[in-house]
Image (cartoon, helix red, strand yellow):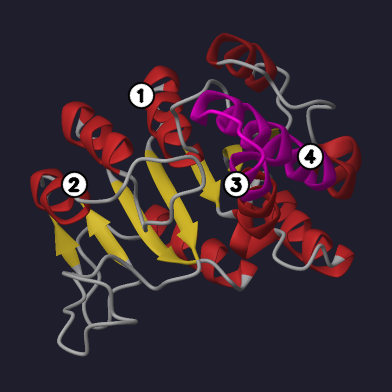
């Protein structure tokens, strides 16, 4: 199976701890023994700090996007270094390059692509382009909520939702470089357009991601009991 995995910068690189990169690399290496893996890394706190500084000195939003993309690619290069010979040696810079890199049989790791696209959007476009079996969005939250659970005690977590329901929830997100949302509106629209089966989940521990991937491969019907994150599907 082909998995496209978006790992948020706040998950992978929040403190630039080398042991964290090694743990995620080890998890990805194990999964790659049975599956094809493409990883898109986010920018996280570092990207937002650079972007905010750029804004304060007068940079426009496109320039801020380019700065954020550079940071996502730095995070991708760190993960590639941790993966060593198991990874394609450099982050692809566009979708066609990612397809060519995947043909190498290695784990492909990349960051952002063009201004105006978050790494979630890149993941969604790439999942469609590569005809991925499923997309996993590993974030610092455990799924999609009806509102921000940090500010609304009545926020309700979705176990399963349709792409249209996802779009309705996230559509109010402010579209600026470095904006924070479990899934950004453009990515949600892409998921709706292409009906890409997607899981939005807490990825702060690498074993959580591997457990979800294995569960997806093993099940023949929806898993009973507690759902891992939020599954977006039309099925």
Q: Residue at x 57, y 23 (%)?
A: 113
Residue 31 position, x and y percent, is: 63, 51
Q: Position of residue 175 (x, y in %)?
A: 35, 40
Q: Which residue is mark 4?
A: 74
First reached walking from the N terminus: tag 3 or tag 4: 3
**Marked residue nearer the N-terminal end (3 or 2):** 3
User: Mark 1, mark 3: which one is toward the viewer?
Assistant: 3
Q: Where does label 3 land, which residue?
A: 42
Q: Quadrant of residue 58?
A: top right
Q: Badge 2, how many Cα within 10 Å: few under 14, some, many 20+?
A: some
| Mark closest to the chain's N terminus, 1 or 4 | 4
Start-end of magenta stretch: 52-79
Q: In this view of the protein, can residue 144 be seen by the observer?
A: yes
Give the numbered dot on residue 128: 1
Dot 4, how many residues are within 10 Å of its Cα: few (below 14), some (14-19), or many (20+)?
Answer: some
Helix, strand or loop status at disc 1: helix
Of the two numbered discs 2 and 4 on the same chain, state the one appearing first in sequence.
4
Report whether 120 appears left or right of 97. Answer: left
């Amino acid at each position: 199976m082909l998995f496209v995995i978006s790992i948020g910068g706040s998950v992978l690189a929040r403190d630039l701890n080398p042991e964290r990169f090694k743990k995620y690399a080890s998890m990805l290496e194990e999964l790659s023994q049975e599956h094809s893996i493409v990883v898109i890394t986010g920018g996280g706190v570092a990207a937002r700090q650079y972007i905010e500084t750029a804004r304060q000195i007068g940079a426009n939003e496109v320039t801020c996007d380019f700065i954020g993309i550079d940071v996502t690619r730095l995070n991708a290069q760190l993960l590639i270094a941790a993966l060593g010979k198991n990874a394609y040696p450099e982050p692809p810079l566009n979708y066609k390059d990612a397809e060519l890199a995947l043909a190498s049989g290695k784990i492909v790791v990349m960051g952002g692509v063009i201004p105006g696209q978050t790494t979630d959007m890149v993941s969604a476009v790439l999942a469609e382009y590569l005809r991925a079996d499923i997309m996993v969005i590993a974030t610092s939250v455990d799924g999609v909520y009806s509102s921000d659970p940090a500010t609304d005690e009545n926020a309700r977590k979705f176990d399963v939702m349709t792409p249209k329901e996802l779009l309705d929830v996230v559509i109010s997100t402010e579209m600026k470089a470095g904006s924070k949302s479990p899934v950004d509106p453009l990515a949600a629209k892409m998921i709706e357009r292409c009906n890409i089966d997607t899981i939005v989940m807490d990825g702060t521990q690498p074993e959580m991601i591997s457990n979800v991937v294995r569960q997806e491969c093993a099940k023949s019907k929806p898993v009973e009991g507690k759902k891992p994150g939020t599954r977006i599907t039309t099925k």
